[in-house]
Image: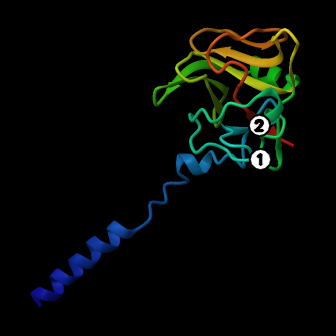
């Protein structure tokens, strides 16, 4: 009889250890980039682009830096570069500087509808391409989205020259088509 009692206890312990936790979706599942979050009527990907056509694994991952030309085709299928009007919606949204796992960035939105835009590596500034981004003959960039992590500086840059950092390569964050 004692053996059956011990066997039953062992089976309960094994069953408890193997059971799934049904506390809801994990953070990474809830923020799956293919679903996005809505801020100001625009569905934003929750992650930057890693390699052309693929999102990074975690929201705080910086991803690849793209040239103005390669940025035009970087978004995965069903996604595209944001317009300046869509970036202006982010400028108007609630935002705050944030550091996640040692990565500086800026969080936009509120409640469940938030995104984190990571800054350039080892920087507090983030640069993101828009649908209308270009570079003129003097090396100045037009129509890029810029933020500074620990200040209230969030803007659309109509003419900016970037020295150092990634030079002429910036991050890509996509919106739903």
Specify the quadrant that holds the N terminus. bottom left
Q: Which mark is residue 174?
A: 2
Question: Position of 62 compared to 10: left or right?
Answer: right
Instruction: Judge the density around disc 2: few (<14), some (14-19), many (≥20) Cα neighbours within 10 Å.
Output: many
* Label located before the other in sequence (1 or 2): 1
Q: Residue at x 75, y 9 (%)?
A: 161
Observer-nearest residue: 17 or 169?
169
* Relative to 121, residue 48 above or below: below
**Residue 99 % position (x, y):** 51, 24
**Residue 158 % position (x, y):** 85, 11
**Residue 20 % position (x, y):** 44, 65
Observer-nearest residue: 72 or 124?
72
* Relative to 67, residue 153 above or below: above
Quadrant of res 119: top right
Q: Residue at x 82, y 40 (%)?
A: 73
> In this figure, which residue is indicated by the disc labeled 1?
76
């Amino acid at each position: 009889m004692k053996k059956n009692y011990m066997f039953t206890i062992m089976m309960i312990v094994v069953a408890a250890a193997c059971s799934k936790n049904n506390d809801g979706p994990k953070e990474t599942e809830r923020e799956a980039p293919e679903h996005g979050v809505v801020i100001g009527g625009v569905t934003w990907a929750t992650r930057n682009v890693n390699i052309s056509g693929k999102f990074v694994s975690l929201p705080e991952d910086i991803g690849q830096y793209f040239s103005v030309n390669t940025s035009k085709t970087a978004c995965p299928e069903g996604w595209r570069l944001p317009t300046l009007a869509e970036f202006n919606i982010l400028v108007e949204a609630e935002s705050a500087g944030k550091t996640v796992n040692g990565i500086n960035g800026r969080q936009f939105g509120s409640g469940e509808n938030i995104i984190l835009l990571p800054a350039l590596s080892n920087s507090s500034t983030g640069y993101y391409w828009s649908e209308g981004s270009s570079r003129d003959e003097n090396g100045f960039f037009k129509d890029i989205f810029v933020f500074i992590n620990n200040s209230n500086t969030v803007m659309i840059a109509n003419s900016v020259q970037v020295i150092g950092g990634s030079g002429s390569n910036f991050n890509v964050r996509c919106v739903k088509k």
